[in-house]
Image: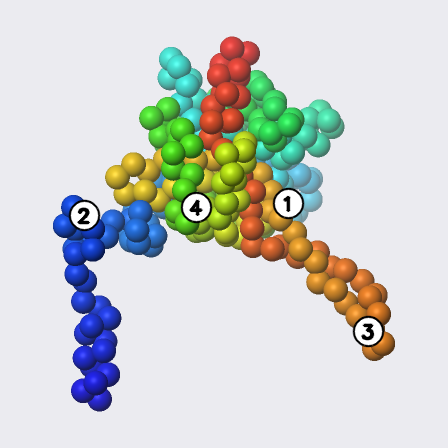
Amino acid sequence: MRYLILLLLAAFTVTPAYGDGRAVPYADAVTFLSTEAVAKQLKKVVFAVQIEGDNKNENKADDWLLIGSGFFVGGANSVVLGVTCYHVIDKPLAEKRQVFVGRDTESGYIRAPAKVVYLDHSNDIAILSPRRTANDQGNFHNLVFQEELFDDDSSLAEGRGVMIPGYPLSLGVEDDKNHPVIRLGMIAQFTGKSYFLIDGVASHGNSGSPVFALNYENPKLVGMVTSYLTDTINLLDANGQLRAQLPYNSGLARAVKMQVIVDALKKAVGNY
């Protein structure tokens, strides 16, 4: 018993291991240190992308259909733009359906119609401009990512922890309330291309989620989730012959990097 107590004491003893003499590592070294404070802020930046569903029946749960996630950014002259994935709004646009973004206001949670101001098909980016509605009389309570938080690729370090808020599996806007889901992961691979990989689960509905690097001294918005990578499970019969292959989520998500999104935002402002 004495040996076990000494072992536990040794395991939890923190000794300076950094050049600046810090005894306790900051959040860029311990991923889950004070992430609740970051999550509280990030939940105010994301929005749910929705279209109208069936509002003629008694079931209120299908009045609005959640089709993806997005996040607000600040533009010039206090303009607020929304960023999401092109594939999230591609089908509604083809069907000439109005796209809405969820916003928190003094009046409560509302869905504001959004105008598409720029599309980048190749990088799966869509830039939206939310519009005010007759019910949108209160102050805008959402936060926006400002330019100083946009990463220049320097935060895309493999192994760095990231936070991914959004609306996977249509969760987060039940009962007309805004409660996005917070997920964590880490940058798994960045080879200098327009995208990077995340070791972290993303589901349907996470498309358009911002990827925020957990760096204590210099936190940055590093990109946006566009998809997840699939793998397959082989189903064999009694003789060992392949009968079917079932796809499943590999746990790796793909994200477009922030510098590509910045280029899209610059073009969007010109079209605004």
Which callout, 4 or 2, points at the residue further toward the start of the chain? 2
- Labels 4 & 1 near each other (Cβ < 8 A): no
Secondary structure of the residue carrying numbered label 2: loop
Mark 1 vs mark 3: in front: 3
Which callout, 4 or 1, points at the residue further toward the start of the chain? 1
Distance of label 3 from label 4 (alpha carbons) = 39 Å
Q: Which disc is residue 62 wearing?
A: 1
> Which residue is denoted by mark 2 in the rendering?
19
Is 169 located above or below residue 220 in the figure? below
Q: Which disc is residue 240 wearing?
A: 3
Distance of label 4 from label 1 (alpha carbons) = 40 Å
- Labels 4 & 2 near each other (Cβ < 8 A): no
Mark 4 vs mark 1: in front: 4
Distance of label 3 from label 2 (alpha carbons) = 57 Å
Q: Amino acid at mark 3?
A: Gly
Q: Position of residue 66 (x, y in %)?
A: 59, 41
Q: Position of residue 204 (x, y in %)?
A: 61, 47
Distance of label 1 from label 3 (alpha carbons) = 44 Å
The answer to whether residue 70 is seen in the rendering is: no
Secondary structure of the residue carrying numbered label 4: loop
Camera-side residue of 95 and 164: 164
- Point 24% across, 71% down: residue: 11
Q: Amino acid at mark 2?
A: Gly
Is 100 located above or below residue 254 in the figure? above
Q: Amino acid at mark 1?
A: Asp
Q: Position of residue 80 (x, y in %)?
A: 43, 22
Outermost residue to the bottom:
1
Q: Position of residue 7 (x, y in %)?
A: 23, 78
- Point 53% across, 15% down: residue: 267
Q: Which disc is residue 158 wearing?
A: 4
